[in-house]
Image (tube, grey):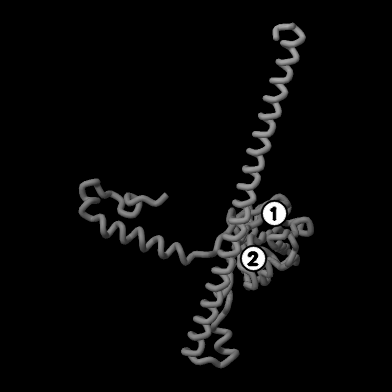
């Protein structure tokens, strides 16, 4: 967790009160810079599979770029993997339906379009069983997932369609508005599902309360009849 002392080391509490504004500015600047970092890397073993969940609206294009590095025990560092090592990519939609299942090389790019809004599962694992040099080693995978209009390469689009800077900017704005509309539709979809779940839960709680009440009433009536028959058998009443 980032603290003010880590951003402004060596400051005492008295001086922190005086220099609070520069420190806060440093924290905000650091957060802004970190917000632009979307790529990540992870390590996988020989038979290990890594899966990521991405909430995606419907009719949205997703592009994933990755590259692999193989650990060199002699140099004790990760080096670019050879061409013989590949990655298997599998993508499932919220209904657990496979929409992408393909094997790529040691460095590649996969693309798919969502047709159902919700949580999509993106899984990657290596073809280590076919590559003996990787046996027992570790693989580092750098992954960058771009969703929606962020997946578009506007430089290529401008060169292909011969767009001016103004036309390109207008196209970017139109696609951004379209993506915002998709996000709003997805949030409405989530809200509707949450409302249906809440209503279903409330109905179940209501019916469970009614069933409990009926059970208690039935047990009370049975106890009263049982006590009455007991007293009558003992000739107490």
Nearer to the camera, 219 or 124? 219
- Determine the residue located farthest toward the front in the rendered image: 237
Q: Is 97 left or right of 70, judged from the image as shown?
A: right
- Residue 170, compared with residue 218, is above or below; it is below
Q: Quadrant of residue 54?
A: bottom right
Q: Which mark is residue 73?
A: none
- Residue 229, compared with residue 121, is above or below; it is above
User: Disc 1 on helix, strand or loop?
Assistant: loop
Q: Quadrant of the C terminus?
A: top right
Q: Which mark is residue 117?
A: 2
Residue that carries the numbered disc 1 in the rendered image: 49
Nearer to the camera, 158 or 210? 210
- Residue under the point 73% across and 52% down: 47
C-alpha gap between disc 2 and disc 1 = 24 Å
Q: Earlier in the sequence, mark 2 or mark 1?
A: 1
Q: Position of residue 160 (x, y in %)?
A: 60, 89
Nearer to the camera, 59 or 236? 236
Labels in figure, total: 2
Q: Position of residue 178 (x, y in %)?
A: 55, 77
């Amino acid at each position: 967790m980032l603290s003010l002392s880590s951003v402004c080391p060596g400051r005492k509490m008295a001086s922190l009160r005086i220099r609070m504004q520069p420190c806060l500015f440093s924290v905000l600047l650091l957060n802004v810079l970190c917000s632009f970092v979307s790529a990540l890397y992870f390590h996988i073993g020989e038979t290990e599979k890594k899966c990521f969940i991405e909430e995606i609206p419907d009719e949205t294009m997703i592009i994933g770029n990755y590259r692999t590095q193989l650990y060199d025990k002699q140099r004790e560092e990760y080096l670019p993997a050879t061409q013989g090592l590949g990655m298997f990519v599998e993508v499932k939609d919220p209904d657990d339906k496979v929409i992408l299942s393909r094997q790529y090389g040691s460095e590649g790019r996969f693309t798919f379009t969502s047709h159902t809004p919700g949580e999509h599962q993106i899984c990657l694992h290596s073809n280590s069983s076919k590559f003996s040099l990787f046996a027992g080693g570790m693989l580092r995978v750098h992954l960058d997932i771009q969703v929606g209009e962020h997946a578009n390469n506007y430089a290529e689009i401008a060169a292909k369609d011969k767009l001016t800077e103004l036309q390109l900017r207008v196209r970017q704005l139109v696609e951004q508005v379209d993506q915002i509309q998709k996000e709003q539709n997805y949030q409405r979809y989530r809200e509707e599902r949450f409302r249906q779940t809440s209503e279903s839960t409330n109905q179940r709680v209501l019916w469970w309360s009614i069933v409990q009440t009926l059970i208690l009433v039935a047990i009370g009536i049975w106890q009263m009849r049982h006590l009455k028959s007991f007293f009558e058998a003992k000739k107490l009443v």
